[in-house]
Image: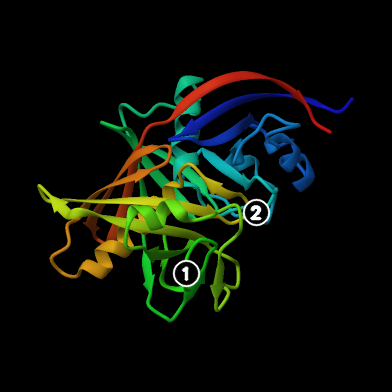
């Protein structure tokens, strides 16, 4: 019997996580252990794990945020480390607040990630996270996916982690995608990328708010019900295609629910903010293999 650890299961619009508190940084989960925890048939089942660790307890040489007490060690379902997770960081914040490890009402909550420190506040949808600066890569990229008749062009969006966003023409095209098979990006990004497929609403903008629908294939995971950074990337891509008159507020429908995106101007440039719910489902103990 392996080591037993306490865990909490949580999700943000169906994007689900196994949360493990390790404040002093004593737990060293292998890729295989993470994959076992996330296995939906033989484990707890999740799209990834969130290890809750104090920034000051991180091993020397690990990316850390000295200006944040807590660090979100996010791992994909296959055990690989990822830079950021927009749904995960809201669930992480929910866990900190609900367990009394942090507060968010009197001041914004700062959380360290491999993509730098992110700031969260409460919002009408639950929590809003400032994902920071973003970048649009207009270099040629095409994506092939099962269910699409021909390869489609995509635009690269970096919101702390890499994405390629592809526009589709109809809801029927979106529904016909078979994302049990990983889409192929050419040329292949050096570190891989999440791939978002989007359909604009008709009309695209109502009341100054843009609206799109999206499905996503996450690297290291597969298709998920939602991807927070992917939602932000999708809104940014459609805003980029729409041009100067495009709005700065968006709603994005994913299979797991609806999230909000805002683009705001800060002193260092344009920031993208993501808002949505976060839910803690149950807690328990699990033996590590």
Position in image of residue 19 (x %, y %)? 60, 31
Which residue is identified by label 1? 149
Outermost residue to the left? 207
Other residues around mark 1 within 10 Å, as few (<14) / some (14–19) / many (≥20): few
Q: Quadrant of residue 119?
A: top left
Q: In the image, residue 285 lies at what x, y percent?
A: 71, 20
Looking at the rendered structure, the number of numbered marks drawn on it comes to 2
Position of 59 with respect to 206 (left or right) is right
Residue drawn where x is 16% and y is 69% of the image: 244
Residue located farthest toward the right when viewing the structure as drawn: 1
Is 23 on the left or on the right of 139, as rendered? right
Q: Is residue 245 left or right of residue 270?
A: left
Dot 2 lies on which element?
loop
Q: Residue 62, labelled with which disc?
A: 2
Q: Give the vertical position of 144 relative to 21 (above or below).
A: below
Screen quadrant of the C terminus: top right
Quarter placement of the N terminus: top right
Q: CA distance from mark 2 to mark 1?
A: 44 Å
Measuring 25% from the left and 63% from the top, which residue is drawn there? 239
At x 27%, y 68%, the residue is 240
Q: Callout 2: few (<14), some (14-19), or many (20+) C-alpha neighbours within 10 Å?
A: few
Please name whichever residue, 138 or 75, is drawn nearer the observer in this view of the structure: 138
Q: Secondary structure at mark 1?
A: loop
Note whether 180 is above or below 20 in the view shown. Answer: below
Q: Position of residue 287 (x, y in %)?
A: 80, 25
Question: Would residue 47 be seen by someone viewing this image from the given angle?
Answer: yes
Rendered residue at 40%/55% (across/down):
174
């Amino acid at each position: 019997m392996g080591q037993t650890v306490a865990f909490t299961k949580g999700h943000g619009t169906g994007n689900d996580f196994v949360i493990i508190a390790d404040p002093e940084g004593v737990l060293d989960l292998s890729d295989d252990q993470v994959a076992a925890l996330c296995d939906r048939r033989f484990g707890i089942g999740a799209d990834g794990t969130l290890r809750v660790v104090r920034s000051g307890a991180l091993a020397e040489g690990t990316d850390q945020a000295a200006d944040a007490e807590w660090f979100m060690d996010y791992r994909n379902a296959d055990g690989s480390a990822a830079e950021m997770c927009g749904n995960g960081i809201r669930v992480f914040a929910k866990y900190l607040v609900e367990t009394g490890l942090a507060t968010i009402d009197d001041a914004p909550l700062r959380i360290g990630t491999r993509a730098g420190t992110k700031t969260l506040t409460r919002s009408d949808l639950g929590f809003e996270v400032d994902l920071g600066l973003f970048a649009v890569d207009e270099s040629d990229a095409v994506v092939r996916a099962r269910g699409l008749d021909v390869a489609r062009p995509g635009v690269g969006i970096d919101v702390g982690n890499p994405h390629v966003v592809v526009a589709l023409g109809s809801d029927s095209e979106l529904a016909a995608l078979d994302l049990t098979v990983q889409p192929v990006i050419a040329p292949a990004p050096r570190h891989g990328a999440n791939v978002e497929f989007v359909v604009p609403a008709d009309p695209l903008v109502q009341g100054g708010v843009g609206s799109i629908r999206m499905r996503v294939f996450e690297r290291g995971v597969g298709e998920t019900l939602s991807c927070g950074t992917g939602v932000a990337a999708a809104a940014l891509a459609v805003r980029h295609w729409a041009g100067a008159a495009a709005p700065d507020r968006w709603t994005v429908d994913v299979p797991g629910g609806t999230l909000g995106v805002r683009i705001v101007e800060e002193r260092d440039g344009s920031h993208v903010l993501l808002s949505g719910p976060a839910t803690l489902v149950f807690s328990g103990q699990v033996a590590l293999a």
